[in-house]
Amino acid sequence: MMRAVKIVILGCTVALMAGIALAQAQESSAMNTKPRARDLGIRIGVYEPGPLDAITDVAGVEVGQTTIIQGDDVRTGVTAILPHAGNMFQQKVAGAVYVFNAFGKLVGSTQVNELGQIETPILLTNTLSVWDAAAAMTDWMLALPGNEEVRSINPVVGETNDGWLNDIRGRHVKAADVVKALESARSGAVEEGTVGAGTGTVAFGWKGGIGTSSRKVNANARGYTVGVLVQTNFGGNLTIAGVPVYRELQPPRRMAARGEKRNSADGSCMMVVATDAPLDARQLMRLAKRATFGLARAGSSGSNGSGDFVVAFSTTAKIPGDAQGNAAASLSEEALSPLFEAAGEATEEAIDNSLLRATTVTGRDGHVIEALPIDRLKEILAEKRAVAK
């Protein structure tokens, strides 16, 4: 009888832990009521955002995410970005990868830059799950109707190291998690903060995560959209709308650890830039480089251990699966300048949104990373007159 009671109590404990984990995951769902940058009156740059202020403002782009929270030490996930909803291998898109600092793993980057094409969705996850995610997406792609005779797939998978909060060595991202992210991808509003590949990330010592933003621009008398999604997990000195927030607001863990060795995982940012402007791979490389301006303005230190990559693509020209060569550009070089500026602005705001929407997380070994305190931030920005009224 006593043993049966113990089993019941243990079952209740497990159920309670599962309930807590589910509650944490739900905090980062579409019901997240935490503000975005524009809700606080923060206006980055000169261009206006699209209707959603998200990468999905670029028509056809879809985002899906799987958040993995298990027990006390699993805090990770997968984020999938689909340039379009069709068979990516049969209808590739023009793409490029820019490497700002290569301390990271970006599967598929060499072929993308060699051919100027992206032939799979783009996945983001944690460092040690990159290869598992790549294998899972390869299986998923090979099984798509029309791919029965395909003998080569170039999965594009990036990462940041969430090992401070997550049991990264456990490699808890499974094939089913990858498939769920891919098959749940939708247009519309994008979940931000402690969700998907951003579940266990840290930025500027605060809880980082997934963030997104967009900009509408005119070039050659036509309107285009540039959208950005980021996975923030890097170090530096937090700066918002030009205000050196770090001078007046520091995370508790960083304050307590002054003079000690910093968290070795404190550095990396994955940036995905989408546009409906008709750009070829060379022009997309130029666009990708400008995203790093937003990374710098947000306060990144670009540390030695920072794996900072930009994946850029255009949704306009679909490249048939059997085509040889690249998509042709139809915008002049001079017309690119507004797009360049938009990429930097959207990246900076996406980083801000990743921080603002994140929630405090307790993870591996009891490590706690706190969310950026919104009320204090509002006071600082108001004092510097850095918010719109």
Image: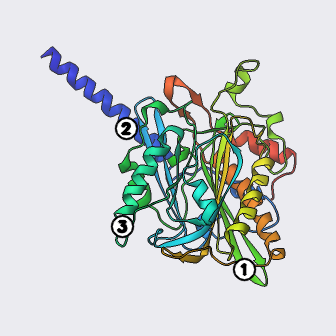
Pick whichever of labels 1 and 3 is earlier in the sequence. Answer: 3
Identify the mark nearer the N-term, 1 or 2: 2
Task: Say what amino acid the circle numbered 1 marks.
Answer: Gly
What is the distance, in whole Å, between disc 1 and disc 3 at their CAs?
34 Å
Residue visible at 50% across and 23% down in the picture:
365
Element carrying mark 2 = helix
Whether 190 is drawn above or below 86: the answer is above
| C-alpha gap between disc 3 and disc 2 | 36 Å
Q: Secondary structure at mark 1?
A: strand
Distance CA(mark 1)–CA(mark 2): 47 Å
Residue at the spot of label 3 = 144
Q: Amino acid at mark 2?
A: Gly
For this orientation, the residue located farthest to the bottom is 221
Q: Quadrant of residue 36?
A: bottom right
User: Whole-percent x and y of residue 197?
Assistant: 53, 46
What is the basis of the colouring in this image? rainbow
Instruction: Name the residue tied to disc 1.
Output: 223
The N terminus is located in which quarter? top left
Q: Which secondary structure, mark 3?
A: loop
Specify whether 383 is left or right of 253: right
